Image (cartoon, grey):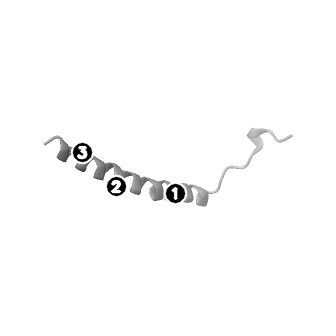
Amino acid sequence: MVDIGEAERPGSGSWVLVALAWIAVGLPLLWGIWTTLQKAAVLFR
């Protein structure tokens, strides 16, 4: 049985991949939210 405390820490390259994955998901999400808010603002004018 492997203790969690004995597990190796992820390398620095994996953190870069996590950051890139967040950017790849976050940018289209933010664009979609921004576009939706702009279109919703037109309805309330």
Residue tagged by mark 2?
31
Comes first in the chain, label 3 or label 1: 1
Q: Are marks 2 and 3 in contact (CB under 8 Å)?
A: no
**Among all residues in the image, which is located at the extreme front?**
43
What secondary structure is found at the residue carrying circle 2? helix
Residue 13 vs 41, above or below: the answer is below
- 1 sits to left or right of 31: right
Q: CA distance from mark 2 to mark 1?
A: 16 Å
> Which residue corresponds to mark 1?
21
Judging by the rendered image, the residue that carries numbered circle 3 is 40
Residue type pointed to by label 3: Ala
Element carrying mark 3 = helix
**Horizontal and vertical percent position of residue 19:** 50, 55
Asked if the residue under mark 1 is in contact with the one under mark 3, i.e. CB atoms within 8 Å, the reply is no
For the point 13% across and 42% down, the residue is: 45
Q: Earlier in the sequence, mark 2 or mark 1?
A: 1
Q: Position of residue 26 (x, y in %)?
A: 43, 53
Would you say 28 lies left or right of 19 here? Answer: left
Residue at image coords 55%, 55%: 18
Cα–Cα gap, marks 2 and 3:
14 Å
